[in-house]
């Protein structure tokens, strides 16, 4: 007999005992059911434990005074610790009712899913007190809503007119109903450091990246008591965040944890990143794949057309008689419902955006008028991983990579995300189209600053456009070349209608050129500098010598790309011996870390000794 481990987090809920009684009474095989409850109570007001006559031997209760609770995710995590080897696990809320034979139905539905790592989840239909079930239950599938002003992602349920004939893949869990094999408890344990607002989206991402797949069930089995008001206007259930003294603190830390996990804003706060090796993302599938499949971008807090209208749910149009409607978030936070038919695909700007959230209802490249797909146009807008970018059709390397894969030099971007912190000041020397600039801007956040230098006129103008498209007020773009001294130089001005690797063109190397200013980074008189990225083909050493005082004063981490063989030897020598940096290899790039930091990277250390450097420069080693 296969057993089912039912987990319930209950916060001062009078419906907890009726819920447990109903699940035993409606089970086809009550003996297979075991229940774990985290009972959060108010001393002197609520009972200190739960007693369910007739089933007490199958129920475990962890009683916690409400002021010691750290929220719903913490409580759900505590129930997982009571697992005793049952083959299946079901997570429900403490205010539920059940169909007759619900246990057998769920096991059969899970077996019908094509994946061995399947999770059944959806918003259950409702019931009214005490036991009036929805007489015509319809399935509910979740679609994304715009990110909130503070950056949380919440979902809205979409009613379908009928259940699917087979389990359908979807994206967003309902924490009130999760059914799977119990291996899930070991592979993807609930994160006790999250709070209510981040619970469902974080767990959906973690399930996906660990290789688990969400399915919409093919019939109703559970019913949920949605919180309604009584005759006096008060909600019938007490909610954790309404009375938990620690709620605000836990919620703030949880939002930072969510932003760190989804690469929106990295944190080094130990309270934020605690135990992420245990409660972080998996390595079976990537966050990028989740975003691409389900129409989200967490780094830019963007919800795309695909997520709004559930385009990833196979056959969704056959399960609804009416079009899906969406809720417009305006500046006044007042909404209206707009049918799909009213959306103008020719609209040249993003039609709906909140004050702090960009809501892109269509991929930017799908807007024919922004710009129109035309061979006569040199530029186009691509929706890349870090945000929309203006690219050149004729660029054969960087733009082709960005348009096809969404990123260029992803190993460098991941390194940047791992070391650059919020509030820092960074330099992007040789910014080109702005791929690294966007990543740097997201990493430093609103209180940080990015100085992006690009002397090639066409690329500089595109860089400015990309920064403007992404609304990045923390980026300063400079049409300047960086070198060893103040003066002028010749920046390439090639024929952009002909295919070329434009970002690889060097200064003073083209017959067609523009005169541009050249300055030493030291002459910028930066008051702070924490990170420098350099990609100026063949001229890194001149730039570094012009940044000598900056390197000595602020000791930034330096990422150097584009070195020629000869220039690479000179650069390694100067940074290692003159500037006292440790040198690491990151693909073809160099990572330079001040020796005094003691920062050990999981990269190949190629730092030379003085004798080895002398041999290297002599060409004898």
Image: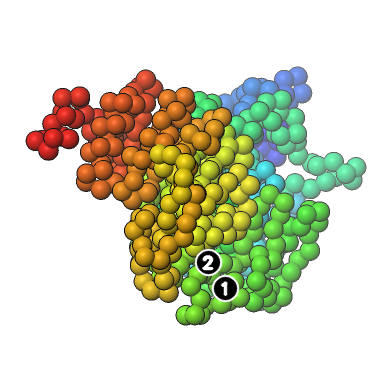
Spot occupied by residue 281 in the image (x, y as percentages of width and height): 43, 43
- Identified at 62% across, 65% down, the residue is 361
483 and 94: which is toward the camera: 483
Rendered location of residue 483, percent (x, y): 41, 42
Location of the C terminus (image quadrant):
top left
Q: Quadrant of residue 83?
A: top left
Which residue, as the protein is rendered here, is positioned at the far bottom? 375
> First in sequence: mark 1 or mark 2?
1
Labelled disc at residue 43 = none
The residue pinned by badge 1 equals 371
Residue 522: give x, y in percent of width and height. 48, 34
Per the image, label 2 sits on a secondary structure element best described as strand
List the single residue furthest toward the left: 620
Q: Position of residue 586 (x, y in %)?
A: 30, 42
Q: Which residue is mark 2?
A: 381
Task: Give above or below for 552 relative to 197.
Answer: above
Foreground of the two, 20 or 550: 550
Q: Quadrant of residue 113?
A: bottom left
How many neighbours does mark 2 have within 10 angstroms: few (below 14), some (14-19), or many (20 or more)? many
Secondary structure found at label 1: loop
CA–CA distance between discs 1 and 2?
Answer: 7 Å
**Rendered view: 42 above or below 211:** above
At a point 53% along the width and 66% down the height, the residue shown is: 381
In this rendered view, identify the residue nearer to me: 191 or 251: 251
Q: Is residue 345 left or right of residue 7?
A: right
Asked if marks 1 and 2 touch (Cβ < 8 Å), the reply is yes
């Amino acid at each position: 007999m296969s057993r089912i481990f039912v987990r319930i987090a209950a916060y001062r809920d009078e419906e907890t005992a009726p819920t447990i009684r109903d699940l035993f009474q409606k089970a086809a095989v009550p003996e297979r059911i075991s229940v774990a409850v985290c009972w959060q109570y108010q001393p002197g007001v609520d009972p200190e434990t739960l007693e369910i006559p007739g089933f007490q031997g199958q129920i475990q209760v962890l009683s916690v005074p409400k002021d010691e609770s750290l929220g719903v995710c913490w409580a759900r995590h505590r129930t997982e610790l009571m697992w005793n080897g049952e083959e299946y696990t079901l997570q429900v809320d403490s205010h539920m009712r059940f169909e007759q034979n619900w246990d057998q139905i769920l096991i059969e539905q899970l077996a019908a899913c094509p994946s061995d790592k399947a999770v059944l989840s959806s918003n259950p239909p409702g019931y009214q007190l005490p036991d009036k079930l929805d007489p015509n239950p319809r399935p509910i599938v979740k679609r994304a809503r715009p990110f909130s002003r503070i950056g949380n992602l919440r979902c809205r349920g979409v009613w379908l007119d009928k259940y699917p004939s087979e389990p359908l893949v979807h994206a967003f869990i309902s924490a009130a109903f999760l059914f799977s094999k119990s291996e899930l408890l070991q592979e993807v344990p609930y994160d006790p450091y999250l709070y209510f607002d981040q619970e469902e989206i974080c767990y959906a991402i973690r399930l996906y990246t660990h290789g688990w797949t969400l399915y919409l069930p093919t019939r109703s089995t559970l019913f949920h008591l949605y919180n309604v008001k009584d005759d006096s206007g008060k909600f019938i259930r007490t909610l954790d965040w309404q009375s938990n003294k620690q709620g605000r603190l836990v919620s703030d830390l949880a939002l930072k944890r969510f932003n760190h996990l989804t690469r929106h804003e990295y944190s080094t706060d130990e309270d934020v990143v605690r135990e992420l090796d245990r409660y972080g993302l998996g390595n079976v599938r990537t966050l990028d794949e989740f975003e691409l499949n389900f129409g989200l971008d967490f780094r830019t807090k963007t919800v795309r057309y695909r997520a709004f209208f559930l385009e990833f749910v196979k056959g969704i149009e056959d399960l609804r008689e009416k079009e899906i409607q969406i809720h417009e978030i305006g500046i006044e936070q007042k909404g209206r419902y707009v049918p799909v038919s009213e959306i103008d695909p020719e609209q040249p700007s993003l039609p709906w955006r909140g004050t702090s959230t960009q809501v892109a209802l269509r991929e930017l490249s799908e807007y024919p008028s922004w710009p129109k797909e035309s061979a006569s146009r040199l530029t186009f807008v691509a929706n890349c991983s870090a945000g929309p970018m203006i690219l050149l059709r004729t660029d054969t390397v960087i733009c082709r990579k960005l348009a096809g894969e969404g990123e260029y030099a992803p190993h460098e971007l991941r390194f940047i995300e791992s070391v650059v912190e919020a509030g820092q000041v960074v330099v992007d020397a040789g910014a080109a189209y702005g791929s690294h600039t966007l990543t740097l801007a997201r990493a430093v956040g609103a209180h940080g600053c990015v100085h992006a230098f690009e002397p090639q006129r066409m690329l500089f103008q595109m860089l400015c456009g990309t920064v403007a498209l992404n609304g990045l007020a923390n980026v300063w773009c400079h049409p300047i070349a960086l070198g060893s001294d103040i003066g002028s130089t010749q920046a390439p001005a090639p024929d952009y209608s002909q295919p070329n690797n434009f970002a690889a063109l060097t200064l003073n190397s083209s017959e067609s050129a523009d005169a541009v200013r050249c300055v030493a980074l030291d002459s910028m008189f930066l008051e702070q500098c924490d990170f420098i990225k350099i990609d100026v083909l063949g001229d890194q050493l001149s730039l570094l010598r012009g940044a000598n005082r900056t390197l000595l004063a602020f000791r930034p981490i330096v990422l150097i790309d584009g070195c020629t063989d000869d220039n690479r030897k000179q650069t390694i020598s100067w940074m290692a011996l003159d500037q006292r940096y440790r040198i690491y290899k990151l693909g073809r790039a160099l990572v330079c870390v001040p020796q005094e930091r003691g920062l050990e990277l999981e990269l190949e250390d190629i730092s030379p000794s003085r004798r080895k450097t002398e041999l290297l420069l002599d060409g004898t080693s």
